[in-house]
Image (cartoon, rainbow, N blue to C red):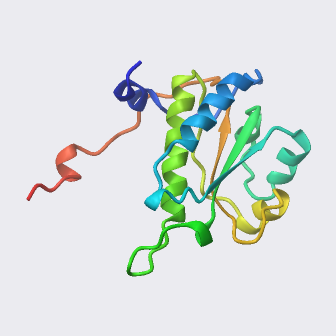
C-alpha cells in the first residue's frame, strides 16, 4: 500500500478484537513513530506502552470510555517541553513534535492492519500519576492499539478550496 492509500484508509476505531498485537508489529510501529521529524531534531518525545490490565483499569479514572479499553495495547505519547526547541517568540514545540510522532504511529499501525483512535480529552494529572511520569513529561495523546472489530465509513472532509489559499 502506498502512503496516500494508508492516509485514506485510516479511521478512528472505537471497537477492538481481543487478539494480541504481535511484538514485531508493535516494534515497527514504534520505530516509525521514533523516526518522526522534530523541531531542530531535539526529539523531546517519550512513549509509554500499556498492556497491564490493572493499569488499564486505573486509567479509566482519566478517560472513561469503555470501548477504549477493549484494545490489547494503549499507547501514551508524551512531550518533554524542557528538551524541545523553542521558536524566537517562545513557542515551545514539544506538543507539535509529539503530535507528529503520534501521526507516524497511527499511519504505521494502519499499514500493519491495526487500528487506533487519537484521544486528547483525558485528565492529565491522573494520567501522569498512574503512569508515574517524571516531572516535566507531559502526556499529549493516548490511543488504543489493536485489531479493529468494526471499520466505519470515511467521515466528511472539507473541500480543499476551503482549506487552501494560494498567493
Query: On the picture, is 139 further left or further right than 92?
Result: right
Query: On the picture, is 18 further left or further right than 32?
Result: right
Q: Residue at x 67, y 34 (%)?
A: 145
Q: Residue at x 83, y 60 (%)?
A: 132
Query: On the picture, is 150 further left or further right than 86?
Result: right
Percent position of residue 47, x then y: 68, 49
Which residue ends up furthest to the front in the rendered image? 41
Percent position of residue 138, x then y: 66, 65
Quadrant showing the C terminus: bottom left
Q: Is residue 48 above or below residue 27?
A: below
Q: Is residue 138 above or below residue 160?
A: below
Q: Is residue 133 above or below residue 17?
A: below
Q: Residue at x 53, y 60 (%)?
A: 42
Quarter of the image holding residue 22? Answer: top right
Quarter of the image holding residue 158? Answer: top left
Quadrant showing the N terminus: top left
**How many numbered marks appear?**
0
Amino acid at each position: 500500500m502506498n502512503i496516500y492509500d494508508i492516509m485514506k484508509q485510516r479511521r478512528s476505531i472505537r471497537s477492538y478484537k481481543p487478539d494480541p498485537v504481535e511484538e514485531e508489529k508493535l516494534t515497527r510501529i514504534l520505530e516509525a513513530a521514533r523516526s518522526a521529524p522534530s523541531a531542530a531534531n531535539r526529539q523531546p518525545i517519550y512513549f509509554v506502552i500499556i498492556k497491564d490490565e490493572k493499569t488499564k483499569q486505573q486509567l479509566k479514572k482519566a478517560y472513561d470510555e469503555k470501548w477504549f479499553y477493549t484494545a490489547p495495547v494503549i499507547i501514551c505519547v508524551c512531550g518533554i517541553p524542557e528538551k524541545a526547541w523553542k521558536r524566537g517568540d517562545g513557542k515551545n514545540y514539544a506538543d507539535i513534535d509529539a503530535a507528529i510522532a503520534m501521526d507516524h504511529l497511527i499511519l504505521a499501525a494502519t499499514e500493519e492492519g491495526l487500528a487506533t483512535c487519537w484521544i486528547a480529552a483525558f485528565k492529565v494529572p491522573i494520567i501522569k500519576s498512574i503512569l508515574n511520569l517524571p516531572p516535566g513529561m507531559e502526556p499529549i495523546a493516548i490511543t488504543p492499539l489493536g485489531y479493529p472489530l468494526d471499520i466505519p465509513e470515511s467521515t466528511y472532509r472539507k473541500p480543499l478550496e476551503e482549506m487552501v489559499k494560494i498567493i
